[in-house]
Amino acid sequence: MSNEIYVSAPGKIILFGEHAVVYGKTAVAGAINLRAYVKLSPTNDNTISLSLYDLNISKTWQFENIYTISNELKKLPNFSNFNTDEEIELSKELISKIGRIHENESHKYDIALEAFCYFITRLIIEKDIKLKSFNMSVRFELPASVGLGSSGAYCSSMIYTLFLFFDVPFELKDVVNYGTFGEYFIHGKSSGIDVALSTYGKIGSFQYGREIEILDCNMDFNIIIVNSKIERDTKKLVAMVREKLEKDKLLVEDLFEKIDKISNESVKILKNIGCIDSKIDSLKILNEFCSKNNNYLLSLDLGHEETTKICDILSQYDITGKITGAGGGGCIYGIEIQKLDHFTREQLCLDLENHGYNYWFCKLGASGVEKHDVIPEIFNMT
């Protein structure tokens, strides 16, 4: 492996609390064993390169250009701790000068490069690092734009790798801080739960402005995640909900309160699972919460005909499907109250495949961001 660095971070599913979490309510989420992987290879050509293999994107920067933008960013207020959307936009405006895939035109994945440039420039400004040449490659087991936390896994694995490479002393809370602000370039101002779960792993509850609480939960249960293959724009959906809140404050706030109650009750179950007589009983309660929370999200117009179709298929196998993430497409998850037998699972898989859906059978509570001493298999694949 020579001096190469390998790091990965998990994706996540939000179990309960989507959208409401942006407004101070509780969300509950779990890390899943679908990950983003980073490989950093030192070079000696006085450039920094980033390759996003699965998106067919690559970019190389000269040191001089990065230092020039860093000097401009130093003049902005709160560059290391955005307080307003205006501060984010001012930073994006400067970083976009070097963050675009194509210099004279915009591209939908410019945001991924802008997050990377934010990390590098903030390290220069805040940690006084001296640039060293390297090539960074990123691979994904996670699909993008479907609510499984690909951007959070991308940001936490990337900044963790940069901390290691530039010998910056750090704690996991620093990964969360940098990663969350980096994700602002991708989604706009968001809750930060994706980065937090990608960093710490396991299952956690979260409120905006507070550190995530990792639950002491030994509950082992199976879930299925189904990808509708409908990509959606989280930033636009968050903005749409904000508009609804402004137009009908009482209705939307009432929905947020109901979602918050579900989240808090689910935390109690997950924390006290050992005190509940039957694991199946507790899963049934969580399953009921899935149904209620999903209906509240549909009331916010966050559904899609494909996600409804997935829920209908899952219901035939006694699994209650629920939107996870921003909605408007993306993924549905469901809890297996009782593990499906081999024949039934095969039939479910066939039904989903016949409709063209991707799916994964997962367990919650994957490990968080971590360095690998052995080359991850994904880098041996083409």
Image (spheres, rainbow, N blue to C red):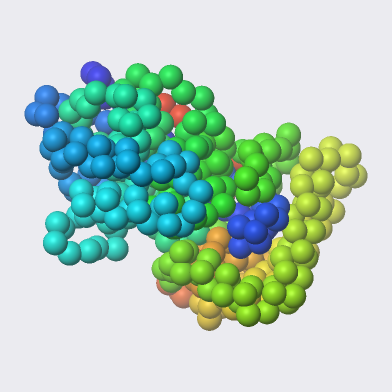
Closest to the observer, 146 or 376: 146
Give me the residue at 24% from left, 63% from top. 107
Give me the residue at 29% from left, 63% from top. 108
Q: Residue furthest left?
A: 45
Closest to the observer, 307 or 65: 65
Q: Quadrant of the N terminus?
A: top left
Instruction: Examine the rendering and report whether any part of residue 228 can be seen.
Output: no
In the rendered view, tell whether residue 296 sits above or below residue 305.
Answer: above
Give me the residue at 47% from left, 41% from top. 81
Res. 55 image quadrant: bottom left
Residue 52 picture location, percent across and down? 26, 48
- On screen, residue 209 versus residue 55, left or right, reads right
Give me the residue at 41% from left, 31% from top. 160
Res. 253 image quadrant: bottom right
Instruction: Examine the rendering and report whether any part of residue 108 can be seen.
Output: yes
Residue 63 picture location, percent across and down? 15, 34
In the rendered view, tell whether residue 7 sits above or below residue 256.
Answer: above
- On screen, residue 159 versus residue 60, left or right, reads right
Residue 117 picture location, percent across and down? 29, 43
Closest to the observer, 137 or 187: 187
In the rendered view, tell whether residue 25 sits above or below residue 274.
Answer: below
Closest to the observer, 140 or 154: 154
- On screen, residue 244 versus residue 170, left or right, reads right
Residue 76 picture location, percent across and down? 36, 44
